[in-house]
Every structure is written in structure tokens, then in C-alpha cells.
Image (spheres, grey):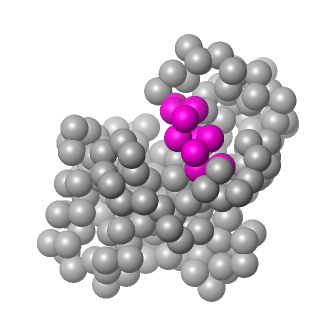
Amino acid sequence: MIPTPEQAYALLQEYNEGEFHLKHGRIVGDVMRWYANELGYGEEADFWQTVGILHDLDFERWPEEHCTRSQIIMRERDIDESVIRATASHGYALTVDIRPEHEMEKVLYATDELTGLIGAVALMRPSKSVSDMEVKSVKKKYKDKKFAAGCSREVIERGAEMLGWDLNTLIQRTILAMRASENVD
């Protein structure tokens, strides 16, 4: 079974209570939907969004088993292996050895950490918004390793490389994707 985005969000709520994790799931889901449409996978937009929503299903309760416990939870619910593999692949070289292969998996890998960094940059802006954000604003903060230190620059760069994009392209596209999200303040 492949959950709809609505079903995916209901499942996320079963295992996450904190507003931060719930909002992050919605934002990454929206970003993934935007990328599906942007990259010519519009017919798979619901699937991409579902993967984005569920990618951190286990993180709040089991951070030490991240991307492992979620596989168990989803298999117990007969969720399709394509969803399980895609969500787990964003933990590549961190918690699991499942390398992102499909373009969708690579996008998730590249943008998960980046959405957090962009969100942190937005909070520092007078507007508190991505609506007027430019790549140079993100790049300035990106260089400061102490800023949003939990957002791995190595993962972001590896993700851009997997996609065959330069860092500026990845940042610009992800800013546009976040602007399109109803869940970004």
C-alpha cells in the first residue's frame, strides 16, 4: 500500500508530537511535491510528497534508530517497499547503507537538511520569510559552520553532487519549493 499524503501525515502524527517534527514533515513533503512537478514527475507528485512527509517518521522517538525503526513500522503496516526504501535512503552514510538511486531519493537526500538551513536563515531575516530570500543570503550563513550546526553541509553537498547540480542551483530551487509550500511561515 502506498499511503496518500493525508494518510502519511496521520501516520507521522502517531509517532511525532512535537510541532517542529510535524511541520518539518509537512514542509519536506511540500518541497518534494514541488520538485516532482518541476522535474517532470507530476504524475508521481503524491508519492513524492508522501515520501517527504514520512522521511523522519522515527526520528522523534528513536533518533538512535533513525531510518531503521521507520522501516519496521512501515512494514508492519504493509506500506509498499518503494516508500520504505525511499524514506530510508535519506539516511545514507549516516545511519543506513541504502544509497539514493532514483532522482526522487536524491532530491530527498539533498533537500532534507537544506530545508532546515533555509528555514533557519529565514528566521534571521527581518521578514522572517523565504518570500524575499536570495541564494546569497543562504550561502553567507551556509559558510558559518556554527549557524544551524545540525544541518549537515556535507550531506547537502553530496546530495547536490548526486543530482549533478551545483550548490547554487540546489539552493535556488529549494528556496522556490519552500516559497510554494503552504506550511512555510
The image position of residue 19, as x and y in percent, is: 40, 40
As rendered, which of 9 and 94 lies closer to the eye? 94
Q: Which residues are magenta?
A: 151-160
Asked where in the image residue 156 lies, by quadrant, the reply is top right
Residue 183 visible:
no
Q: Magenta region, mostly helix, strand or loop? A: helix
Q: Residue at x 65, y 49 (%)?
A: 160
Q: Is residue 62 visible?
A: yes
The foreground one among 71 and 89 is: 89
Front in this rendered view, residue 156 or 126: 156
Look at the image and tell me in which quarter the N terminus lies. Answer: bottom left
- Position of residue 81 relative to residue 88, above or below, is below
Indicate left or right for 176 with 151 as reference. right
Residue 179 lies, with reference to residue 30, above or below; the image says: above
The image position of residue 180, as x and y in percent, is 72, 56
Q: Using the rendered view, name the quadrant where residue 2 is placed.
A: bottom left
The percent coordinates of residue 152 (x first, y second) are 51, 32
Compared to residue 126, the image places residue 53 above or below, namely below
Q: Residue at x 65, y 16 (%)?
A: 144
Q: Is residue 155 magenta?
A: yes
Left or right: 127 as drawn, with respect to 182: right
The image quadrant of residue 85 is bottom left
* Magenta stretch holds residue 156: yes
Image x and y of residue 179, in percent: 74, 50
Left or right of 12 in this view: 50: right
